[in-house]
Image (tube, helix red, strand yellow):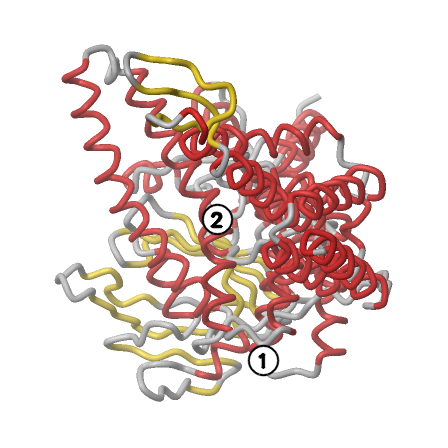
Amino acid sequence: MGKIILETKELTFAYPDGTKALQGVSVQIKAGKTTAILGNNGAGKSTLFLNLKGMLKPHGGEIFFQGEPVAYQKGEAKALWRAVGLVFQDPDNQLFSASVFQDVSFGPMNLNLSQDEVKNRVEDALQRTGISHLRNKPTHSLSYGQKKRVALAGVLAMEPKLLILDEPTAGLDPAGIEEIMGLIQEMQQKSGISVMISTHDIDLVPLYCDEVYVLNQGRIALSGPPREVFTQGQVLQELHLRLPWIAQLMEVLSKEDQFHFDAPGVTVSQARETINRWRAENK
Amino acid sequence: MLNLDQYAYLSNLSKQDSLEKLIFSLLTLIVCIWANEPVISIIIMLIMGGITVFRGGTSLKVFLKLLSIPSAFLLISVIAIGIDVTKNPEALWGPMRVLNSYIGLSVVGLPVAVNLFFKALGAVSCLYYLILSTPIVDLLSALESLGVPSLLREMMGLIYRFIFVFIETAQEMHLAQRARLGYTTLRGSYRSLGTLISNLLVQALRKSEALYTALEARGYQGELRVLEDAEDRITKGYLGIIGTNLGLVFITLGIRAMGRG
């Protein structure tokens, strides 16, 4: 088992209007891995993220960062502020400056680093997200996908240990989705950063994620590696989610067409492997 | 007109030190107003237009088109000052009898009107030079070196940034309303416009809340501290700026001396 960077135990949170957003959420986020949070709208994903970022203080339960319980002062957890980076869904809500360079520099400037260090980090973040050529463009002239990258760069420049992305693929075209997910994957392989994403794009999860948590009405309904979680089609359907298409195909093949797979697989390559193995065995 | 900033980014002058441009523009503006001479105003228009077009590479068409906007307003007010109706034909050039009074170009008013017209255009051309050569972001950093308080600069920057979001949202709402025939009748138009405006307000509030949360997530502590992208700026020094304006001042004094002598 890998090291755990962030862990919550029985986290509860309710908004002033009485909405119980989190009702005992326990998650373990593995270091250097990508964890996906699935769940329909209003399941509590964004609330969970704000709790993990230390911007909301949980009403019950505890958060452990690298094994240490997190301390709160005036309702904020400073340890989490620095260690966790949160990229919001709508980049227009995050980008405040008219200049790309200045916007990316905002986070590191708030870490009270030297100007040279800030400059290095901004350059590095721009390069890693592939937007160095946009540095002097006005923010409003960028495309939606470019804005998403600037928003990501703005958080990366703070060099968080855990990067949380709230629906990084929402509103992007297929090429844009592949680009941004590829970018995150590549970054992870290079720097070993831990990543957590929320998404409605279920087919994406087996491709890019190592762990899955399914959040439903403020509770964790399912968890595990994609290959395990995506065998439970019935449960997912009750949670208003579905299997990835490949997993669905494998399920139908084994249920309706008398194929017998021991490990059905949830991605194209896994399914291909499984079917080829089945063919070799049944020749 | 929102694309004015785009011209600034495209201008060859955008790489020049923004403080120099700001000071050149403001100093010349002050000289233009102080001089109060049509000749000086025209010279300033030519200088500003010349630099913007020949050095900056902005098309002459754009510059003239922009100048034509205030010109239209100016012409209307100039007519009011320059044309007079009086009973004394001596006070008019080319008096025309209308009933028992005269209408014509006012002997006193016309020079004032002409002077006013060119003075205003000269002053506006100073500002156009600045706007067409300096992106807002650079302008804000120039204002910083002039000691403008950060609160003002931050507000200018935020307003500039969110004007685009605001307009986009309004356009989308308007389109959605039109798609549902919201503007086919006069009554409907008023109602649709009303809901659009009130909705925009709510949206703006929501956006500002979301922005605040996002800023906090990046460690916002009450001040929007950012790093300037320290590119190599072309500095020309202040010699040319001061020289040009001293020249203008001397010409003005010369014209005045001639007028007296």
Considering the image in quadrants, where does the C terminus of chain B appear? Answer: bottom right
**Circle 2 sits on which residue?**
A92
Placement of B59 over or under B214, stated as above or below: above
Relative horizontal placement of residue B34, taking residue A43 as reference (left or right): right
Percent x, y of residue B107: 50, 33
Residue visible at 31% across and 17% down in the picture? B178
Specify few, some or many for label 1: CA neighbours under 10 Å numbering under 14, 14-19, or 20 or more.
Answer: some
Front-lying residue, B69 or B254: B254
**Circle 1 sits on which residue?**
A111
Identity, as a three-letter code, of the amino acid under mark 2: Asp
Front-lying residue, A91 or B253: B253
Percent x, y of residue A235: 32, 42
Placement of B26 over or under B217, stated as above or below: above
Front-lying residue, A87 or B247: B247
Tag 2's secondary structure?
A: helix
Relative horizontal placement of residue B32, taking residue B220 as reference (left or right): right
Percent x, y of residue B113: 51, 37
Tag 1's secondary structure?
A: loop
Percent x, y of residue B227: 66, 70
Considering the image in quadrants, where does the N terminus of chain B appear? Answer: top right
